[in-house]
Image (spheres, rainbow, N blue to C red):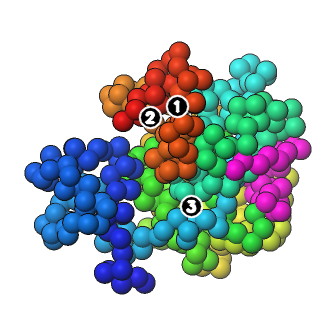
Amino acid sequence: MKRFDSINIGEVLRRARENMGLTQEEIALKLNIGRDAVLRIEKGTRKITAEELHELIGIYNLGIEDLLLYEDDDEINNIKGIILAGGSGTRLYPITKGVSKQLLPIYDKPMIYYPLSVLMQAGIKNILIITTKEDQPYFQRLLKDGSQFGIKLEYAIQPKPEGLAQAFLIGEDFIGDSACAMVLGDNIFYGNGLVRELKQAIRNTNNDIATIFGYEVKDPERFGIMELDSDNNVIGVEEKPKLPKSDYAITGLYFYPKGVSEMAKKVKPSERNELEITSLNELYLNNKKLKARLLGEGYSWFDTGTFESLLDASNMIKTIEENRDAVICSPEKIAYENNWIDNDILMKSAGEQRKNSYGEYLERLGEK
C-alpha cells in the first residue's frame, strides 16, 4: 500500500476530470476558485485544502481507495488486450452476409471502435484483434497498425468459432507472460466511472485475481450469470441457466492475471463442443481468484447481437453526443487526451474525416 503523502493527487484529479469530460473552467466554477488555481492543483504546485479535496472526490465520484491505489502508466504497461471479433453473425442475417458484424456502424463510428475504446481507457496499448480469415483484411484496412491511435495492433485468425476461451489459445504467443484483458467485439460499455472500474480490474490482475463485470438485465436466462452473496462476492457462474440465481449478466469484458493461456488449456469442451468462458471463470472461482465489478446505475452495456440492440445502441450514442456536443468512445480522442498522439496526428485524422461531425469534433479538440 502506498503512503498517502507519496501520491500525486493532482495527477489523479486531472485524470478523473478528463475521464468525466469536465473542463478546468467547470471545476473552478464548482469550487468557486479561479481556473488557474485548478491548473496549479493538477500540476501539484498549489496545496489543496481538505474541503476542496472532499468536494472534488464528490464531483469525480472517487473513493479513498482510488487515491491510495492509484497507479502510474508504467505500472500497467505489462497488461495486454484482446478484441475477439470473429464469428459469423448469423443472428444479424442478412445484414452480416457481406460484412463482419463488428464493422457495422453504431451511430457515427464502426462497432469495433467501442470495445477498442474500452481497452484504451484502461491504458492498454498492445492489442490483438482476432477475426475470421475472410474479414481480417477489412479490419486491417480500417485500423492499420494502430499508430494513428498511439497504440500497437496485431491480428490473428480464428479458423472457426469454438468458444470465447479459445481466444487465449489463439493469442498465447501474443500474451506471453503478461496479464490480459479481453473484450468482445460486439460489446459496448459506457459510464462516467468506467475508467475507475477498469483500473481496479488491472489492480486485481497484479494480485493474481481475475475480474468479470456484471450488469443487471431483465432476461438473465439469455446470458452467462454470476451468483453473488450478500456482500456481492462471486459464489457461482452459470451459462444461460433456465432458473437464474441472479439478474446479473456476465458482460463481454474480462481481466485475467498472467498465466491465462495455461489456464485456458484446462478448459474442456462443452456439450456444444466449445471452450466456454464460463468454464474458464469457474477455474478461477474454484481457486478463489475471481472477483466481480458490478456496473450499476449510470452505466450502459449493450451486447449488439440483435437488430433491436443495434438500433438501441445507436440511439443512445446519438443522444449522449448531441446532449454533450461531443464525441464519445473515440480512439483518437482517448489517444490525444492520454498524450499517446500529438496534435499533428490528431489533426491529420480530423482532416481525413472533415466532411462529417466526427471529424469536425476532432478538429475542435485539436484547436483547444
Q: Nearer the viewer, residue 367 or 12?
A: 367
List the residue tagged with mark 2. 366
Query: Is residue 286 shown above or below 355?
Result: below
Q: Amino acid at mark 3?
A: Ile
> At numbered mark 2, what does the secondary structure look like: helix, strand or loop?
helix
> At numbered mark 1, what does the secondary structure look like: helix, strand or loop?
helix
In this rendering, the count of numbered labels is: 3
Quarter of the picture holding the N terminus: bottom left
Q: Which residues are magenta?
A: 152-174
The answer to whether 230 appears left or right of 107 in the picture is left
Q: Nearer the viewer, residue 257 or 244?
A: 257
List the residue tagged with mark 3. 212
- Residue at image position (22%, 44%) is 25
The answer to whether 343 appears left or right of 110 in the picture is left
Give whichever of discs 3 and 1 has the lower sequence position.
Answer: 3
Query: Is residue 263 shown above or below 308?
Result: below
- Residue at image position (67%, 44%) is 147
List the residue tagged with mark 1. 347
